[in-house]
């Protein structure tokens, strides 16, 4: 009888060990699926953040380009030129007259080309020689 009881205990122990082993494998499998899902979510988040940073960077570049616009003044009366050269035609107003910028007038800086600044004055855009301007502000 003791031998039968011994074998029963051994069988129960073996069965319990198998159950524990099966449960441990199920837990490990569940954990590995959870880890895989988490890693996929992290990759998706990283991709979204990278895309967002790229969009923000483009916005920063646009802002930086706009930030170069500034206010400056003329040091003498000067004609607003169509091109960045002094032997070119002047910009004409609505009546067909040359656009002349008086001394001390405020102009808006738009860019630079050689010895000329591209500027805006009273809605007209053209070029003014750098030597006739002052107070370039970014």
Image (spheres, grey):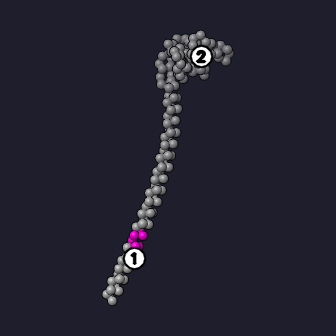
Residue 110: name its quadrant: top right
Q: Which residues are magenta?
A: 18-23
Residue toward you, 70 or 49: 49
**Camera-side residue: 130 or 23?**
23
Q: Is residue 81 above or below residue 44?
A: above
Residue 77 visible somewhere in the drawing:
yes
Mark 1 closeness class: few <14, some 14–19, many ≥20 residues within 10 Å: few
Q: Position of residue 118 (x, y in %)?
A: 55, 20
Q: Label 1 belongs to which residue?
A: 15
Closer to the camera in the image, 80 or 88: 88
Disc 2 or 1, which lies upstream in sequence? 1
The residue positioned 52% from the left and 16% from the top of the image is 114
Residue beneath the point at 61% across and 16% down: 82
The kind of secondary structure the magenta stretch mainly shows is helix
Residue underneath mark 2:
83
Q: Residue at x 49, y 43 (%)?
A: 50
Callout 2 secondary element: loop
Q: Quadrant of the N terminus?
A: bottom left
In the picture as drawn, the residue positioned furthest to the top comes out as 87
Picture coordinates of residue 115 (x, y %)?
A: 51, 15
């Amino acid at each position: 009888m003791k031998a039968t009881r011994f074998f029963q205990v051994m069988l129960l122990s073996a069965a319990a060990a198998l159950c524990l082993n099966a449960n441990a494998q199920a837990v490990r499998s569940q954990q590995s699926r959870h880890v895989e899902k988490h890693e996929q979510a992290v990759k998706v988040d990283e991709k979204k953040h990278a895309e967002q940073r790229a969009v923000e960077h483009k916005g920063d570049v646009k802002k930086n380009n706009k930030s170069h616009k500034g206010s400056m003044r003329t040091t003498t009366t000067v004609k607003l030129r169509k091109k960045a050269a002094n032997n070119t035609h002047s910009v004409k107003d609505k009546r067909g007259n040359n656009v002349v910028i008086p001394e001390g007038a405020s102009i808006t800086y738009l860019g630079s080309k050689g010895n000329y600044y591209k500027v805006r004055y009273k809605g007209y855009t053209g070029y003014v020689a750098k030597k006739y301007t002052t107070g370039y502000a970014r």
